[in-house]
Amino acid sequence: MDSGTLERIEKLRMENAVGQLDLIGRRLVYGAEHSMWELDTRRLPWSVRRWRRKARKFAEQHIRPLAPEADLDPHAFDPMPVITKATEWGFQNNMADPRATLLHSAVAEEFATECGGIALAILAHNLGVAPLFLSGHLPTWFRHFFPLYWRLGRGKPRPMAFAITEPGAGSDVEEPEGGAAARLVTAAKKVGGGYILNGSKTFISGGAVADWVTVFATLENEGLDSWTCFLVKKGMQGFSVGRCERKMGQRACDASELIFEDVFVPDDHVVGRPRGGWAINRNTLNYSRPVVGAMALGHGRGAFERCLDFCRRTRLGNKRVIDYQDIQIELADMMISLWAARSTIWHSCRRIIANQSLSAAAKVAGSDTAFKVCNQAMEIMGDHGYLHANGVERSWRDSRLTQIYEGTNQINRLAVIEQQWSSDIDGDGSA
Ligand SMILES: Cc1cc2nc3c(=O)[nH]c(=O)nc-3n(C[C@H](O)[C@H](O)[C@H](O)COP(=O)(O)OP(=O)(O)OC[C@H]3O[C@@H](n4cnc5c(N)ncnc54)[C@H](O)[C@@H]3O)c2cc1C
């Protein structure tokens, strides 16, 4: 292209064309170019915007350098230093923030952009804390939640984990039909002053490093409707960590078996009321599913950003990969998918009180989009995408897990149907 044509193209670009308008016209048109990240950040409420910027800085400084090794050799990786740093930066004690879900989603995306495993090692804590807060039970708040908050606020970590899954019950404890027929093994027997807990939980993220665990158990010889949430602390007699799984993705965070052998749990360690566990569990999942969607989004964005970098640096024939229009169309498609998923997630988090359908939709949109975008990045990068050093295959592996935990995406779709059944699906929409 000759220089005259290039000059004319340049003049026609939106940013420059705006200059042709008079003053009022210029005020009505937004021509400035911002990165996708900056554009989105500016659309967040001010308080959350601040957290998004802070989380990005933290992720670049404290997660990025650890990510490759933590993924390659997770058993040699000690997550406590980074968890401690995250606590010092204030990322572990904002559950009671008026915009907690949006804030956690914004932070989760930033952390996961760098490394899913380290992100999970830090964020699993919030999932463990959620039942304490969401129980809405004042004695639980005063006995456990506020003292924990105070400690975390002083930068002292106390990692927590959330334990519902059992060897024979995964989806069953995430939707009512499965729940009614669930075969649960973790049970609590009432004794003087407390309960005796027996059984085991599996796949518990951060279970090996957690100081405190919110554990869900049926009352002896009863079904899921008796489910009760207990706060179990490291060091309680009979509580131990069993096997730690070898994982495909998010490897830097352990997924552990927790074993309860005649563990005495005092009455004041019941979270909420006895038999209140099912509602607390459902509410916790509704709070956390958008955050999982946001983590997934981070994996997708990480893959996208690394792919972009590759396209800029690599030459194919006599031009850079990024100069091919079919590549540009593919990149635009990835950006649009990420935007659509982010909109769904942020929309679901606008209110602090979670809505089951919106939460499940956010989780599905984030995770399905991330997996697709990671695939597109690998497609564009070819053999380079397959190399560990480039980080895209890691995002691809990390993103796959987000389609499985917190209820598989099939179960999340059923959650949407359950919530919308009488208002939309089987009704006339008037409910
Ligand atoms: C790495 C990892 C970390 C985890 N972290 C935690 C944690 O911190 N705490 C915790 O409590 N749990 C955790 N989990 C457990 C996780 O939430 C469950 O694995 C998940 O909910 C799926 O349950 P499942 O594996 O038993 O699958 P299953 O319930 O056995 O499902 C198998 C298949 O059947 C499908 N299916 C099941 N029911 C239906 C239905 N009614 N209709 C249609 N399809 C159906 C599912 O979609 C899936 O495809 C973790 C799991 C993993 C892998």
Image (tube, helix red, strand yellow):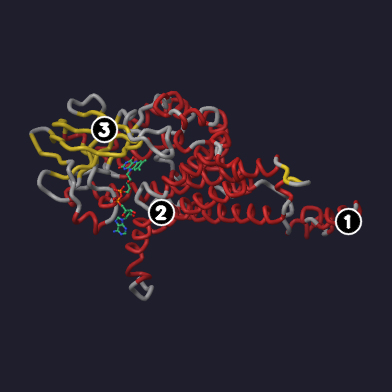
Mark 1: which amino acid? Thr
Q: Position of residue 418 (x, y in %)?
A: 32, 63
Where does label 3 land, which residue? Answer: 143
Mark 1 vs 3: CB contact within 8 A = no
Secondary structure type for disc 2 = helix
Residue 58 lies in quadrant: top right
Q: Where is residue 291 in the image (x, y as percent from the top left)?
A: 44, 46
Residue that sits furthest to the left in the current view: 192
Mark 2: which amino acid? Ser
Residue at screen point 83% across, 56% down: 9
Residue 17 lies in quadrant: bottom right
Q: Where is residue 271 in the image (x, y as percent from the top left)?
A: 24, 40
Q: Which of label 1 and label 3 is nearer to you?
A: 1
* Mark 1 neighbour class, 10 Å CA radius: few under 14, some 14 to 19, many 20 or more: few
Where does label 1 land, which residue? Answer: 5
The span from disc 1 to disc 2 (Cα, nearest Å) is: 50 Å
* Mark 3 neighbour class, 10 Å CA radius: few under 14, some 14 to 19, many 20 or more: some
Q: Which of label 3 and label 2 is nearer to you?
A: 2
Check the picture and name the quadrant holding the C terminus.
Answer: bottom left
Asked whether residue 170 appears in the rendered view, the answer is yes
**Mark 3 vs mark 2: which is more N-terminal?**
3
The span from disc 3 to disc 2 (Cα, nearest Å) is: 29 Å
